[in-house]
Amino acid sequence: MDQSSFKDYKLSYEIIEAIDKLGYVNPTEVQRKVLPFALEKKDLVVRSQTGSGKTAAYTIPISEMIDWYENKPQALVLAPTRELAVQVKDDITNIGRLKRIKATAIYGRQPFAIQKTELKQKNHVVVGTPGRVLDHIERGTINLTQIKFLVIDEADEMLSMGFIEQVEAIVKELPKDRVTMLFSATFPEAVKNLALIFMSDPIYIAMEADGITVDKIEHLQYRVVEDEKFSLLIDVTITENPDSCIIFCRTKERVDALYALLTGLQYPCSKIHGGMEQEDRLKTMNDFKRGAFRYLIATDVAARGIDVENISLIINYDKPLKKESYVHRTGRTGRAGLEGKAITFVTAKEESYMRDITEFIGLDIPVISNPSKEEVSLKKAAFDKKLIDKPSLKKPKNDHLNKHIMTLYFNGGKKKKLRATNFVGVISNIEGVTAEDIGIITISDTHTYVDILNDKGPIVLAAMKNITVCGKLLKVSKANKK
Ligand code: AMP
């Protein structure tokens, strides 16, 4: 089972090619352990934290096993936060891009009607937060009759956010004949029970580097009095001068307050917490991923499970409320083999709590002395320089994958009675283009997006300016964004 190449698994060309274009050279430990069993359709309980490659450990086999011709959803992924749901949907879209797998994310605070329209279309995978999935079930706007795969991701977080009853209610609505996979970074008793309720005889998989990443992350703590936290933060940011840093606070009010202070000092920063509008949260995360700013101030919930490459520093400005959160927070750094540092500010009152954490993670976290005045002034010039440096934006990881794909926008959709087959019929008739060159088609009421693969985008774009779809000449252009 100790295979070291994706080619060693029974994966089809389209999946291997997408993995390759995403730049994944070798499977990670969790992928090596999960892939063989998942491809054999075994129920799995997997202990692994974010950053280990666990999302691809289930999105790869699910994408492989999806039957493209089935129009109703075959896989349901439950995730605790909206950001994670969107991220998992994006991961499936990337891995399944060349197989043309259609995934949809459904979550709260986005208009129900938009999701309802999306769910009416062809969908292979639905990723959702429990509350909103249940809403769709209750209103009869989601068809679960063909679900063959269920993934419960970040089960421990689902539990601590109080979603377990909703998860149970959803599972009751699913076909019994299905594969269930549960992923969790930590395993409190209630998560173990969940596995017992939902699965029959699952295979338990744990990672060798269990619980906490020690080899790639340096864990440190500073002693501080509450009133001096801010000045310590300034000193630490100067001495560490990170390229990318998340600062965790206890509450959204504290996030807002710290954000105001750091903005006042011209820190390139932004914030994320549960009190913000969904659109703003997603935009902030996307900008952070692109490297548009360097400091993200966050509460636990909002930053949970978020995949951002190259975060070099995590600062626990306030201690995590739960021991498990320490694992989740610090799992934001040291991802995909890179190195990182996790610093926790600890007040005298919190010392015993911190000992509980070190016991829980089985790791001694050294207390180091606060940065000296000399060190701070020595490093200040470099810090000031970086503060005004224009950030160099990172390329998204699917950049290479999307290189040969052009998304076209047509100004007609459902209201003009257009269907995906109409587009496939017309486009595949263009000289030099076949149905194989057509990727995901997304039709809404007033417009349609069509992915054109294999560098055939310009040919289709030029041709469709003069060709009608169902007797209608549509305006067509290269889409800016979907
Ligand atoms: P996750 O634990 O699923 O949040 O993934 C952590 C990061 O590792 C993500 O940025 C993935 O894109 C990346 N990743 C997943 N699998 C691999 C792989 N086999 N090789 C390199 N990077 C990977």
Image (spheres, helix red, strand yellow):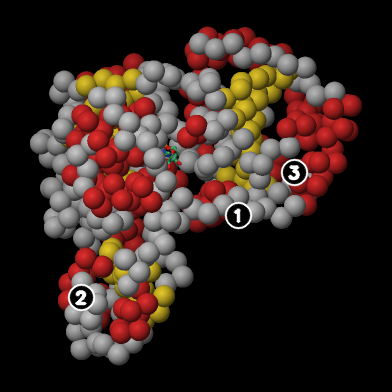
Q: CA distance from mark 3 to mark 2?
A: 55 Å
What is the quadrant of the N terminus in the image?
top left
Task: Look at the numbered discs 3 and 2 and tell me whether their residues touch, using CB distance below 8 Å.
Answer: no
Q: Is residue 242 left or right of residue 130?
A: right
The x and y percentages for residue 370 are 79, 21
The x and y percentages for residue 238 are 78, 35
Q: Is residue 122 left or right of residue 300?
A: left
Tag 3: residue type? Answer: Leu
Between disc 1 and disc 3, the foreground one is: 1
- Residue 428 image label: 2
Can you say whether 393 is above or below 305 in the image? below
Q: CA distance from mark 2 to mark 1?
A: 37 Å
Q: Earlier along the polypeptide chain: callout 1 or callout 3?
A: 3
Give the labeled residue for mark 3.
262
Q: Residue at x 58, y 48 (%)?
A: 288
Tag 2: residue type? Answer: Ser
Residue 455 or 428: which is nearer the viewer? 455
Q: Residue at x 17, y 72 (%)?
A: 421
The x and y percentages for residue 150 are 23, 38
Tally of numbered discs: 3
Can you say whether 363 is above or below 343 in the image? above
Residue 16 or 406: which is nearer the viewer? 16
Classify 10 Å Cα crowding around label 3: few (below 14), some (14-19), many (20 and above): some
The x and y percentages for residue 297 are 63, 40
Q: CA distance from mark 1 to mark 3?
A: 22 Å
Q: Quadrant of residue 119?
A: bottom left
Q: Secondary structure at mark 3?
A: helix
Give the labeled residue for mark 1.
393
Residue 195 or 461: which is nearer the viewer? 461
